[in-house]
Image: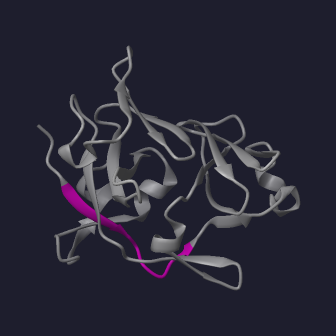
Amino acid sequence: MNKTIHIHKIAGQKKDAVRINNATDIPEFLRRNISVGGSTLVLVCVEGTEYAPLGSVIGYEESSSTDTKYNVWCIGNAATNLVEIDGVFYKKATVFEAQLVGEEFPEFLDGANIRRNADGSWTIKTDWGESTGFPGKAYWVRYGTKPDGTPDANILTKTEKSYRDYVVCDEAGQDIGLLCEVDPE
């Protein structure tokens, strides 16, 4: 059984993110990853195709795991975990529960739409699509609770740049060390 840990992002750092209200807000370098279909953003990311409403905050990072060389995702919890100043986003140090993906999913995700795949991976349905992770190669992260009472959660893949943005801490938020150093790729 995997152990639940507490993590937070490094606070105060600039977050590579952009709010997309219409197609003209999509940066040129992300146009192969993000498109607009009606009032919906279509995102091509490492964990699969995701969908988000116009006006969403979209995170991005360089990635060798996609043909476009970028990974993108909807930051559905941007209002809670980021501060926006003049269109630039900065990280807050909000503490989350996390657990290494293993043979079972953690109790803190009870009520989430999760399935086990034939290849041994796990997939979680989020408000903006589906994310998939493999045992030992990714973390389940619970960011909070949605208004309907279900977990606000996603999968954090260890090979992606954003993995290095998390700090392991105790329940009170006292730092222990970088997640990528506590559990290297």
Name above or below for residue 83 compared with residue 108. below
Residue 26 position, x and y percent, is 80, 58
Q: Over which residues does the magenta segment extend?
A: 5-14
Q: Quadrant of the N terminus?
A: top left
Residue 155 position, x and y percent, is 41, 44
Point out the residue furthest to the bottom here.
Answer: 85
Point out the residue furthest to the top here.
Answer: 118
- Which residue is depicted at the point 82% across and 45% down? 38
Point out the residue furthest to the right here.
Answer: 24
- Which residue is depicted at the point 81% across and 48% down? 31
Total marks in image:
0
Q: Does 105 lie within the magenta span?
A: no
Q: Does 6 lie within the magenta span?
A: yes
Of residues 12 and 117, the one nearer the viewer is 117
- Which residue is depicted at the point 39% across and 50% down? 153
Asked if residue 150 lies left or right of residue 127, the reply is left
Residue 89 position, x and y percent, is 60, 76
Report the colour scheme: one colour
Asked if residue 59 lies left or right of residue 8, the reply is right
- Which residue is depicted at the point 42% across and 55% down? 163
Point out the residue furthest to the front here.
Answer: 148
* Residue 44, image quadrant: top right
* Residue 9, image quadrant: bottom left
For the stretch drawn in magenta, the main secondary structure is: strand
Q: Quadrant of the C terminus?
A: top left
Residue 150 position, x and y percent, is 35, 50
Asked if residue 25 lies left or right of residue 81, the reply is right
